[in-house]
Amino acid sequence: MKSTLLIALTLFTTASFANADLKLPGERWEAKSIGYRCAAYADDSSAPFSHDEFDVQFEYLRTDKTLDNGLVIATFTEEDSVCRYSAILLADNAKSTIKLVESKSYASQGSSECLEGKAIIDSQLKDNDYLYWGHPHHLTIMMPVESAQEVCGEGATHVGLDFLVSGFLGNRD
C-alpha cells in the first residue's frame, strides 16, 4: 500500500511540475514587455507575423543579481489551447548578446502539446544581440524573424522584443 501511495504521489508531483513555468533562483529585477521596436529609440512597431499568428503575448523578463541570467514568460495560442511559455536566457553583457539556455511550454487550457509555438519562439530567442538603452531603461532583444522587412522596412532582418525595466524584486544583499 505504501509503495502504491508513493508512486501515486510521485506521479502527481511530476505532473504538477510539468504544468509549471521554469523558475529563476534569486530573481531581482523585472522588466515588463511593452511590444516591439525595430531599433533603440525607434517608434513602436507591429509584432512579427509569426507572433500575430500564434497570438504571442510576452509578459515579463526577470533577471537575477548578476543581470546575466534571465527568465522570459509568455503565452500563445495553438490549436484549441492557451499555452504558457517560459525560457531561461543567458546574457553576455560585455558583448550585448543573449542566448536561449532552456525553455518549456505547456497548455494551461486545452489539450495541445504547444510544440509549434514553442519551436517558433525558441528559434527567435536562440542567439541574439540585445540593446540596453534609454531612460527609463529598455532591454530590447533583437530577434531574427521572416517578416522583419514587412515590419521594419527594406533590408531589415530582425525585430526587437522590447521590455521596460519596471521594478526591483527581492532584497538588496
Image: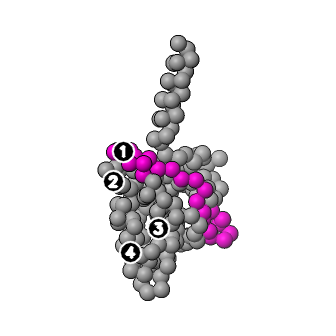
Indicate which disc, 3 or 1, sits on the residue closer to the N terminus. Answer: 1
Q: Which residues are magenta?
A: 91-114
Q: Which mark is residue 79?
A: 2
Indicate which disc, 1 or 2, sits on the residue closer to the N terminus. Answer: 2
Residue 107 in the image: above or below residue 155: above
Amino acid tagged 4: Ser
Q: Which mark is residue 161?
A: 3
Q: Position of residue 66 (x, y in %)?
A: 65, 56
Amino acid tagged 2: Glu
Residue corresponding to mark 1: 111
Amino acid tagged 3: Leu
Magenta span: predominant SS is strand
Cα gap from disc 3 to disc 1, whole angstroms: 28 Å
Labels 1 & 2 near each other (Cβ < 8 A): yes
Question: Does residue 92 appear left or right of residue 105 in this picture?
Answer: right
Residue 21 in the image: above or below residue 16: below
Indicate which disc, 2 or 4, sits on the residue closer to the N terminus. Answer: 4
Labels 1 & 4 near each other (Cβ < 8 A): no
Marks 1, 4: nearer the viewer: 1
Crowd band around label 2 with a 10 angstrom C-alpha radius: few (<14), some (14–19), many (20+) = few
Amino acid tagged 1: Ser
> Element under label 1?
loop
Cα gap from disc 3 to disc 2, whole angstroms: 24 Å
> Element under label 2?
loop
Cα gap from disc 2 to disc 4, whole angstroms: 27 Å
Crowd band around label 4 with a 10 angstrom C-alpha radius: few (<14), some (14–19), many (20+) = some
Cα gap from disc 1 to disc 2, whole angstroms: 8 Å
